[in-house]
Amino acid sequence: MPPEIQSSSQVFISYNHSDRAACVQLRTELEKAGLSVFQDEKNIHRSDRWLTELQNALQQCSAFVLLIGKDGIRRWVGAEVEVALTRHLAPHDDAERLPIFPILLDDAQPESLPPFLALFQVDRWKPSDPLADALIEAIKTRTIRSDSKTVFEGCPYLGLSAFSRDDARLFFGRRRETLEALTYLGNQQQSDPEQLHQHKATAYTRWLQIEGNSGSGKSSLVNAGMLPLIERDALWARTGFEHWHILGSMMPGKTPLEKLAETLEQGLIEDPTRRNALGRLKRLKEDARALAFTLKDFKRDNTAFLLIIDQFEELFTFADESERKQFDVLLTAALADPECPLFLINTVRADFLDRFEYLPHLQSIYNTQCKRYFLPLISAQGLQDCIEQPAKLADLDVSEITTAILKDAQDEIGALPLVENALLLLWQQRQDHKLSGQLYQQQGGIAGMLSSQADALLARIDQAVPQGKLAALELLLRLTRINDEGRHTRQRVTLDEAIFVAGNGDDKTGRKVVGMLSGERDNAAMHTEHHNVLRLITINREQDRHYADLIHETLIRVRGKDIATGKLIGYWPTLFDYIDNNHDRDQYRQLLAHESKQWQHSEGLGRIWNLRWFGLSKFRQLRTPKHSIEGRFLAWSKRMQAGLLLMLAILVLYGTESIVWVQRHDLSPDMIWTLQRFRFGGPILPALTVIPSGSFNMGEQDAAFIAGLGEAKKYFGVPGKTIQIAQPFYMSTTEITYEQYDYYVWQQHRAGNKVEFPSTAKGGRGDQPVVNVNWFEAVAYAHWLSEQTGQQCRLPTEAEWEYAARAGTTTAYHWGDKPGSNNANCDGCGSRWDNQEAAPAGSFSANQYGLYDMSGNVWEWTCSNWRERFDGSEQHCNNDDTDSQYRVVRGGSWNHSPDRVRSAVRGHHLDLRPDLGNFDVGFRVLCESSIQ
């Protein structure tokens, strides 16, 4: 029996101010019994360092009496209870624990007690009555009294299932860690909680990350440990928020944005008919501030939102990349917004902490705004509590198994789920409220029980379904995200896909296998009324869809290495070895999913190009539903693969013909590929630019320059004249290129017309301006272009050409009076093509009308007759294809000086008749239109 309270020790009374009168009476009763009562209002000041003062006060007290009225446990009382529970749970020796005595007033509700307090014996008391002698004696002797009135009905052990909020009463072994983790959220400087909203502390944490090894119980700690306490105001003292709106928990899965949208809709909107998850998802995808704005829209006084994200590592291992990136941005924006009342608790496996680089925005605030709590392996005392405390609630005798289980657990890193599983299986075969030590040894201990029971389930499935064991293993493999280092993780799939995989397309077989794996009874296979079925998978519903998932990662975890071979050994060797033997299956599935998605989002020829033409055999073992994207992708790939030989034969035929064609026309080899573009691509036509109507002074405008011309004046339009351009028109943006002209020639050949390919220029073909084309050939191209576009196309008159070249300027060049550097291609213009060869069309800046290369590069044909002086011919076309008069060329070329590429320069080349082409003469087209 613990020693009695010494006269110098005091009893701490925790109470709400609404129960002050009752507290005064309670103090009187305790003092009558010879007990000293601590005066909290005299010794603890509600200001900075209040928590330290409270901890010091409780350190001096030998008992904690909690007076609970109609207001339950709120605000300061909650803070006092938290410190008291810490003092109760921290010591290993019961004699050192702080005894806690909950006392309920008449108007108090027992269900208002936090789960941790529900374990203590609770006394009812009226202030008008004396305290019960038994209670006074317990306080004096510091006796810890457990609640033994209510016996838990059903199984007090959850097996491999994680604890939820509804299981809080059964959650043992981690209560000290629960209270420790809670202290990491909110204010870290012990500021007055009532002032936190007005003067936010600098050390104020809104993001808590629970880290730990697989199987350490992270999810259970949050859901069954922390959340029930948070819902009872456990965070008020550190955050200043009395009310908490819990969102989740959610798991990111493959589509974290979709899961977040569903979580927000379910958590924020009570009426299911008003929820719009698709609309919420759209906003989350489009705006990085959508999460913060949503929570601010729903913000209420003295209320904060707490988002729970379980299995955070799914963002690294499973989530779609684009959704992961936006999820990262959304969370960071909300946590960084001081007006957004969002708090975050996430759980993550410790072996994936190196993946945070995949979340660059969260990583940027990781060290400053995230508190990290590492959940250690459960202690021996914790495991003992997991065994014995639920047994007390259910009136079970566990004396035969406790020592044996604790001994076996010493050598297991992830013992907790194994212990829970063993306890469940032993409870299922209990006799007279006793769990059998003999059965425990026969089943091979905590690790052997999992393996043997799982193998037995596979054997029953194999008896019930043809090749049932293989079907079950295939489904379990599908529910595993495989890691080359053995760090496998779970991955959920829809129930429909699980049924398909388990049945390999047979719905009846698939449902049977899924049912048996998820715990469905098969009475014909049972031998005792207590022999329940081991569950290896769970079926959960989210929104309107059902999902299948492995019940726990222990099923796929590494237990150790074989000393002789160095091979990894799993806790369930059957499944672990099957995964190892098919380790490439998950990689192929991910590859298939990636390629299928690419194919789904492609258009036109991309739908064919993004099919898989080779290596389809690697996907044969994947059980892929035919109606899925992957199934349709494979079906189309198989169809296309069947025609591949024919396509190759056609390509060989085309290739051979193309080579012959190129050789016959004396073209370069690269024209083979150009020919294929002509065949399979769209029309290759020049881009056209609108030239507005207007007037301008045609000819050279610089008097000083004219004075030095002498006999050369005729080549610069001297004397000039004013020209009116009455109607706007279109002009090709660049000189006609080889590719555009070659396409025209190819089309003529297809039509049976004899048109020659122009010889190749020094710079090659492709996007080089076409040269070696005579005037008649240029006119023929313009006529053909008219047929293609539905417009009347021709060569420009000399006046139209200069009007378009000047583009509203009166300077020597469209960019100014000086040649400058790299404004054009001529002999002295400062370009890399100067006096070497023509530059690719469009290599220099356009003029004000958007036309390129109007100065230099290559001369350009016009449709006007040559005259030494302007006589009206400059505004008319001579389209007589029998007329051999010289036609004017404009613009200068790459082998002329800067003076010979001025906007006014004109030429006719004395040796260049309309029926002759030249190495530096090309053309551009004008198209008339009804432009107003």
Image (tube, helix red, strand yellow):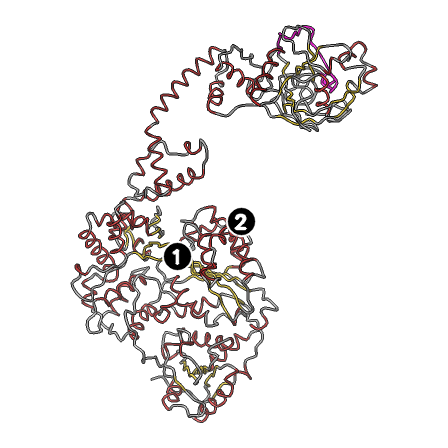
Quadrant the N terminus occupies: bottom left
Q: Which residue is mark 1?
A: 542
* Residue type, numbered disc 1: Glu
Is residue 128 rendered magenta in the image?
Answer: no
Q: Position of residue 145 (x, y in %)?
A: 35, 81
State the predominant SS element of the stretch in magenta: loop
Q: Nearer the viewer, residue 266 or 880?
A: 880
SS class, disc 2: helix
Taking 420 as reference, is 635 above or below it? above
Tell me the kind of residue under disc 2: Glu
Q: Could you tell me which secondary element the residue under label 1 belongs to?
A: strand
The one of 4 and 101 positioned closer to us in this rendering: 101
- Magenta region, residue range: 897-918
List the residue tagged with mark 2. Answer: 286
Residue 350 visible in the picture? yes
Quadrant of res 530: bottom left
Count of numbered tags: 2
Give the x, y percent position of residue 885.
68, 6
Q: Residue at x 30, y 48 (%)?
A: 477
Q: Which numbered disc covers residue 281? A: none
The answer to whether 513 is drawn above or below residue 6 in the figure is above
State the residue in front, 275 or 811: 275
Q: Is residue 344 above or below residue 715?
A: below
Q: Is residue 900 a member of the stretch shown in magenta?
A: yes
